[in-house]
Amino acid sequence: MEHELSGSLALMPREGEVDVIVFAGGAPTRARTSKVIAPLGEMLVRFGVIANVDLESALARAGLAKARLGAQLVNERVIDRRVLLEALRQQVLVRLRSLAALPDATRYEFHANADLLEDGPPTNAAVCDPLAGLHAIVRAWPAKGPIEALLDPLADREVVFHPSATPRRFDLDEAEREIVDRIEHGQRITYAGLVRVARAPMNVVRALLYSFVVTRHLDVGDDRWPLAVALPAPEAVASLRDSSLNTGMDKLRTSQVIRAVGAAEDFKEAAALARAQRWEEAEILALRAVERDPGPPEHRALLGTVLVERSPNNLKRALALLDSAIADAGRDDALFVLRAKILERAGRIREALRDYRTAASINPRNPDARVGVKSTSANPSRASSLSPNVGRAWWAFVGACLALALLGIVWLVRR
């Protein structure tokens, strides 16, 4: 923010996970997390703009039109464009808050003048005030040590705003606005005194003071001007897509990040298609997710599940993918349940029962594991419960074998 940088900050907390924040002139314009957090539909429901039922139908219409949800709703005049922009801005803030809890060992890369999320919608629509973005992270920051180290030496100093401070830009909630009002219009008060008399919890007061101090909006006597980055113009955001600015990028490192980000997107979309039982499309995206980034076990597990749904002939490959995913993930009850369901459908009931029991021992509250143990224990020797298509294929195979046998007998008789 202080240097008004433009580019993409890639955060890698764990193997196979990449979170990306795109900045334009120091302001966050978009944030994408490796885990699904605050999808646009959820934000619109939260605002009360559309209902959950309307969301399902809107998602279906957007899928048929091959359009993004926001663009579809604006085109249909279900929502106003200004509502969409506010939802996108709030989405950035929610995702920034989620990044506050990343582990200390998180690795990062900054790619100057590059939009690693360039496959998405234009980012000028969702420009977020950098002061609000910074405070969103501080609010959720679990590390209290740095906050105490900064504020404790100021305990006896009077709390005074810098003459050029703009505290309302921090996207304050009601409790925080009361604190600001007390500083602006109340009696002279010290940092320690404000923590004691404010009606908000101590951690809220200290987080707000920390944000104000590090951005120099509170006067701490060093004569430095407050950080007050202006929101970037649309052309500044658009310049991130200008390939001529990317000449200084390390292509090998960048391509690795881009592949991981792309794989995460492919995985999310493939999972949604699988839930809709659109197996052919799900297979294409699940396969691409594994090819781009085979590291995350869930990528391989999803591909295995989709493959066996597409054709029982893929059983061996599907089980190999699940075996590999379980070996890497360790004690993940969801993966054991997935493998158990495939084994159960293939008629390998005893093996399925073993996986269901393992999943139940890892997580006794897993409902699929409990039901699976009950159903497979009731009749461990029952025949295969593969889908009707598999049954028809089996009987077709048996019929073909009988026909060949009959032809062989006729040939031998004639001979």
Image (tube, rainbow, N blue to C red):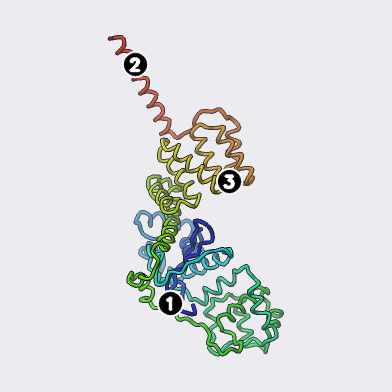
First in sequence: mark 3 vs mark 1 = 1
- The residue sitting at 34% across, 56% down in the picture is 65
Q: Position of residue 239 (x, y in %)?
A: 35, 73
Q: Position of residue 189 (x, y in %)?
A: 68, 87
Eye-nearest disc, 2 or 1: 1
**Marks 3 and 2, how far apart at CA:** 49 Å
Locate residue 45 relative to residue 287 in the image: left or right: right
Name the kind of residue labelled 3 in the image: Asp
Please give the residue where the numbered disc 3 appears in the rendered image.
333
Q: Is residue 382 above or below residue 245?
A: above
First in sequence: mark 3 vs mark 2 = 3
Callout 2: 10 Å neighbours few (<14), some, many (20+)? few
Please give the residue where the numbered disc 2 appears in the rendered image.
406
Name the kind of residue labelled 1 in the image: Gly
Query: In the structure shown, which secondary structural element does the residue marked by tag 1 occupy?
Result: loop
Q: In the depicted view, which residue is nearer to us: 369 or 246?
A: 246
Q: In the depicted view, which residue is nearer to us: 106 or 74?
A: 106
